[in-house]
Amino acid sequence: MSNTITLRGRKVVGGRAEGEALVTHDTVPGWGGVNPVQGVITEVRHELRGVSFKDKILVCPGAKGSSGWSAMYHTARLAGTAPRALVFNEMTTKIALGAVVMRVPSVTDLDRNPLDVIETGDWVIVDGDAGTVEITKVRT
Amino acid sequence: MKLTDSEKEFLEGNRGKAQQKAMELLVRYAEALGAERFVDTNNVCGVPGSANPFLQNYYKDKGTSEYDAIFSFFDLDSDELVEAPQALVSTCCLQGGADPDNWETLGTKPQVFSIYKDREQFAADHGVKILKTCTPYIVGNTPARGEHCAWMESSAVVYCNSVLGARTNTEGRESTSAAMLTGKIPDWGFHRTEFRYGSHRIDVDVPIESVMDWGMLGYFVGDVVQERIPVLTGQYGQPDLVRHKHFGAAAASSGGVELYHIVGITPEAPTLDAAFGPNRPIETFRYGRAERKRTYEAINSSAKDPDVDYVMLGCPHAALEQIEEVCRLLEGRRISANSALWIFTSRAVKEQALARGFLDIIAKSGGIVMTDTCSAFAQAIPPGTKVAALDSAKQAHYLPAIMNIQAWFGSTRDCIEAAITGKWNPESL
């Protein structure tokens, strides 16, 4: 299919998931900027303020904020509000540990900037073990 | 990953079941980071076994008296219930959700307070030092230069790396609990010398003296460098512990600064060249009068109403010198009937404040000194608060968003005057 693009990178957390992309160009906040029980970003000036990441393929530059990041997204997993997969650019201890305890397929170090290729609403398949992201564009 | 024999012992379960689960989690985490090995640590700061009402309710009936469900399933992210062993290495417990003496004033419900008390007992029973503060470096945990640590709390992490020259990443709940049982943490990021050189240069072109000056400079620096490593050069006096505390906490809030260098001041920056090592500055920023004014306005952007209902000091937790300063400003005067003054500190500093008579002076004026927590962490402000006054850029960054209130930021003196008069009337910048 002509409207399918594949990006190649490296495994952060293994497994395979697919779903609708939720893309943000802002780094994703932890404690003080997210409500994990509702699965919603709450940071005042964030692009995704009030938006739910539940069951989405979250595509972002990386994580920011307090050391409570992993515990927030770990709580989201328990509450059933976690995203289905993570695709990100900048590796930090916050997002690495957060991806591990969320237990969702995650990839980074992709051969193209995922923020340039993926748009919110695209259908995305993340294969953590292969380190690939397959994107079906909604708009061509 | 390259695992040593002792790490393999952990992984094979020869050191205990919980220790095996801890090592499995650390290996998953290290592989996610792309780390190739672990470093040994004997200095962990975390929140092992702590709980909030959500976690307490989620795991109720899933554990037994010896086999702790929260520690097994949440701290170690294990699928198996395991016996929670004693800490293997030196471990401190950071801040929590309620004050042990004034929890009712904070609005904590009795059943929630009993969760906090039970979880503190869990930590104490497992060999964890009950520091209950975001400032472990004020109350005795001052790692040596080069020491590998595994710390949570962004304001403590930046102090540990920058001021002490010890080495830690911003760890999380699960990685610190796993490190507590194994003495291992991934050798990645700030543990490695090549990662610690500066990335951005900041030319300071306006005199930096007061705690407030340092707080504003930190807020500016975090905003412009985000997660990178700033190197400061220019006009500043010798900062003391309190100034570093406010600078670092602000830089770790407006951005994600985990290490900064101040030329001629911090241990890894004897010269500009030493601070940058093999790096060339990616960008240079100037902090002059105009930048200072813009920063002051940005920190104050949530505030417009001059009637102050609440003054909060002690973010990060107040040092004794800061409580002494409050007493000098407050002694013999009364806080306005329309306002409240809460000061947050560590238990150890509160004990010293008691010995010096400071608690008495503050109580007579109508203020309260609390420990263990703060307004942002406990999500607790006096009932009906619409406008707060703060001397911390970090707290001014978080509190309006968390509690949906306005917050003024200024000097400690501005804040105490606001508590006494009920009005925000700051000295000119």
Image (cartoon, rainbow, N blue to C red):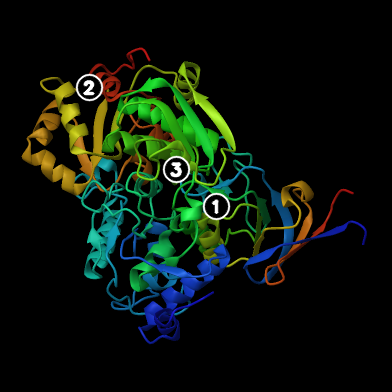
Residue highlighted by disc 2: B337
Mark 3 or mark 2: which comes first in sequence? 3
Q: State the separation of the CA atoms marked 2 and 1.
A: 38 Å
Q: Is residue B251 above or below residue B121?
A: above
Q: Percent from the top left, x then y, of residue A43?
A: 53, 40
Q: Which residue is mark 1?
A: A38
The crowding category of the residue bearing disc 3, from other C-alpha atoms within 10 Å (few below 14, some 14 to 19, many at least 20), is some
Chain under label 2?
A: B
Callouts 3 and 2 close, C-beta under 8 Å:
no
Tell me the amino acid under the disc marked 2.
Ala
Around disc 1, counting alpha carbons within 10 Å, would you say few (fewer than 14), some (14 to 19), or many (20 or more)? Answer: some
| Proximity of marks 2 and 1: CB atoms separated by less than 8 Å | no
- What amino acid type should be assigned to the residue bearing mark 1? Gln
Q: Are marks 1 and 3 on the same chain?
A: no
Work out whether residue A105 can be spotted.
no
Q: Quadrant of residue B40?
A: bottom left
In this picture, residue A112 sits left or right of residue B43: right
Q: CA distance from mark 3 to mark 2?
A: 54 Å
Give the side of residue B74 with respect to residue B378, left or right: right
Q: Secondary structure at mark 1?
A: loop
Q: Are marks 3 and 2 on the same chain?
A: yes
Callout 3 amino acid:
Ala
Q: Quadrant of residue B319?
A: top left
Q: Is residue B127 visible?
A: yes
Helix, strand, or loop for circle 2?
A: loop
Numbered label attached to residue B274: 3
Q: Is residue B131 above or below residue B381?
A: below
Camera-side residue: A128 or B124? Answer: A128
Q: Chain of mark 1?
A: A
